[in-house]
């Protein structure tokens, strides 16, 4: 087979050579340069060769005129390029999660937080009891940095020393402000001898039991639960300092059927 291929290649080369010579003679006879723009006669494959020959001229394996076109090599992807893209995407997601966590942490620490109602002391305004679905409230931790605590605000504060140890935070309503005198008599609460109108008090308690007058020191607050007959509050543990106040409860967000502003 190899010998046969060599004969075929030699014959093709000789035929091509003869035709080129004819073109040279023709050009000389017409006064044209003999070797200018020599082209292979039509029908002759240039650069096809046998056994991978790159020319259609003399010899085998590349001898003669090389008229074949060579395709540009396709560059291979850089090692690890796909892995680099995947790593970049993972890095972006990790960065997004970290930023989100920091934002949520910042909001909870300085702006807003949520608390479950730990007891029934704020019934019927807020629902909470052992073994039931307690209300979940949102607490604004920012506004008191720029404004004063108001009477009848519902606030969350750190547990006073005399309060039950199982409660880390308590929620009550502000009744007496610094410098005021608070007292209870005839089923009502009086502040500086003026009776308060309190539509939020649990009606099943039939008002507020009598208690001795208390003058609220500067920088402190007198707080009470709306469920006056079942609330451990300033009547027992005394006034609370401004520094213990975490924020103002402003909305009930759970369960859905209790959704409302406070």
Image (cartoon, helix red, strand yellow):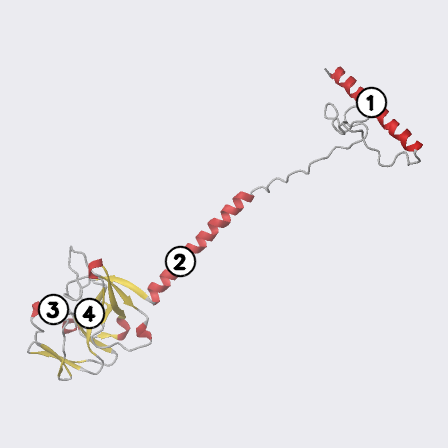
N-terminal of the pair, mark 4 or mark 3, is: 4
| Residue located farthest toward the bottom when viewing the structure as drawn | 193
Whether residue 235 is visible here, answered yes or no, is yes
Q: Which residue is mark 2?
A: 100
Q: Earlier in the sequence, mark 1 or mark 2?
A: 1
Label 1 sits on residue = 15
Helix, strand or loop at label 2? It is helix
> What residue does disc 3 label?
202
Q: Earlier in the sequence, mark 3 or mark 2?
A: 2
**In this rendering, the label closer to the viewer, 4 or 2:** 2
Q: Are there few (<14), some (14-19), or many (20+) residues within 10 Å of tag 2?
A: few
Q: Disc 1 or disc 3, which is closer to the eye?
A: 1
| Foreground of the two, 256 or 124 | 256
x, y percentage for residue 189? 12, 78
On the image, numbered disc 4 is attached to which residue? Answer: 172
Q: Is residue 108 left or right of residue 216?
A: right
- Whether residue 212 is visible here, answered yes or no, is no
Q: Quadrant of the C terminus?
A: bottom left
Eye-nearest disc, 1 or 4:
1
Rendered image: mark on residue 167: none
Residue 125 place in picture, x, y as percent: 17, 67
Q: Secondary structure at mark 3?
A: loop
Give residue 2's position: percent from left, percent from top.
Answer: 74, 17
Mark toward the start of the polypeptide (4 vs 2): 2
Disc 4 element: strand
Q: Residues within 10 Å of mark 3 (few under 14, many from 20)?
A: many
In this rendering, the label closer to the viewer, 1 or 2 = 1
Cβ–Cβ under 8 Å for marks 1 and 2: no
138 vs 120, nearest the viewer: 138
């Amino acid at each position: 087979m190899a010998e046969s291929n060599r004969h075929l290649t030699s014959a093709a080369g000789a035929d091509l050579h003869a035709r080129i010579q004819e073109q040279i003679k023709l050009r000389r006879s017409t006064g044209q340069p003999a070797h200018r723009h020599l082209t292979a006669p039509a029908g002759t494959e240039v650069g096809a060769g046998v056994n991978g020959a790159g020319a259609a001229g003399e010899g085998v394996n590349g001898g003669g005129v090389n008229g074949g076109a060579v395709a540009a090599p396709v560059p291979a992807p850089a090692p690890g390029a796909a892995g680099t893209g995947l790593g970049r995407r993972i890095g972006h997601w990790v960065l997004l999660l970290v930023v989100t966590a920091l934002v949520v942490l910042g909001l909870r620490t300085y702006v807003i937080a949520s608390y479950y109602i730990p007891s029934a002391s704020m019934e019927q305004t807020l629902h909470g009891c052992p073994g039931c679905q307690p209300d979940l409230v949102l607490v604004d931790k920012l506004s008191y940095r720029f404004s004063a605590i108001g009477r009848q605000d519902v606030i969350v504060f750190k547990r006073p020393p005399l309060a039950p140890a199982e409660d880390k935070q308590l929620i009550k309503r502000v009744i007496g402000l610094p410098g005021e005198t608070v007292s209870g008599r005839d089923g009502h609460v009086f502040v500086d001898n003026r009776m308060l109108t309190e539509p939020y008090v649990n009606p099943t308690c039939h008002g507020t039991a009598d208690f001795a007058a208390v003058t609220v020191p500067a920088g402190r607050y007198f707080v009470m639960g709306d469920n006056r007959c079942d609330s451990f509050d300033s009547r027992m543990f005394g006034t609370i300092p401004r520094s213990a106040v975490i924020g103002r409860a402003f909305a009930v967000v759970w369960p859905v059927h209790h959704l409302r502003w406070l």
